[in-house]
Amino acid sequence: MRKLIVISHLSLDGVIQSMGRADEDPSGGFAYGGWIGAYTDELVGSVVQREMKLPFDLLIGRKTFDIWAPYWPYHADIWPGVNTATKYVASNTLTAHEWQPTVFLSGDIGAKVSQIKQQPGPDLHVYGSGNLVQTLMQQDLVDAFWLKIYPLTLGKGKRLFADGSIPLAFKVTESQVTPKGVILVNYERDGALTPGGS
């Protein structure tokens, strides 16, 4: 079965919004776009590069697709795999696009993703896509989180773990801390959550 892996950069208070560029996602009046910039170093870069070179298909939300589709087809030198990967896009309105191969998913996203996970193929990597991630967590479809946690708080913005997450147990499979204090940590599912730690 294919694993579903959420790959995310987040602040200490869980914000994932507009981490890369100032104009990436200013929705809700978010004014701190590009907040990872001061913390990027060779170690963060090497981990990101390693993840980008793995075999994968993408599972992303419509807003993330709208940000990526005008950019990545013209930057294959940076990330060639993103163009050849199948891109599964959760959208109730978009049904076709020239960035291929792309499959649009509408309706019961949880059921459709569950079916995709049963099919042969590489693991599914989820980037950004805050609303989609909430749906995936609520329906117990996330197998792993690969997180980069930055030593700052933003106070507002879209969060990775918003209201509605269900109780799940994870274990650390890899972790390190960069000289600038970024925690690079991978978590995988670890069975059922045991109340009280018993």
Image (cartoon, rainbow, N blue to C red):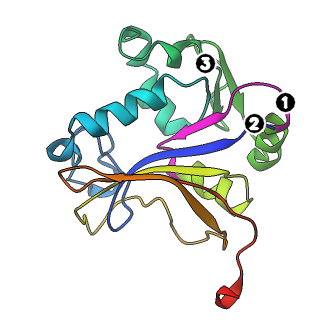
- CA separation in Å, label 2 and label 3: 14 Å
Tell me if label 3 and label 1 are in contact, CB under 8 Å: no
- Judged from the image, the secondary structure of the residue bearing numbered disc 3 is loop
- Which quarter of the picture shows residue 118? top right
Residue at left offset 74%, top offset 45%: 109
Left or right of residue 29, residue 69 in this image: right
Q: Mark 2 or 3 closer to N-term? A: 2
* Residue with the mark numbered 3: 85
Q: Compared to 58, does 43 lie above or below?
A: below
- Judged from the image, the secondary structure of the residue bearing numbered disc 2 is loop
Residue at left offset 30%, top offset 45%: 19
* Residue with the mark numbered 1: 119
Q: Disc 2 residue type?
A: Arg
103 drawn magenta = no
Q: Disc 3 residue type?
A: Ala
Give the total number of marks visible in the rendering: 3
* Residue with the mark numbered 2: 2
- Quadrant of the rendering where the N terminus is positioned: top right
Looking at the rendering, the stretch of residues picked out in magenta corresponds to 118-130
Q: Nearer the viewer, mark 2 or mark 3?
A: 2
Residue 2 on image: x %, y %: 75, 36
Tell me if label 1 and label 2 are in contact, CB under 8 Å: yes
- Which quarter of the picture shows residue 60? top right
- Judged from the image, the secondary structure of the residue bearing numbered disc 1 is loop
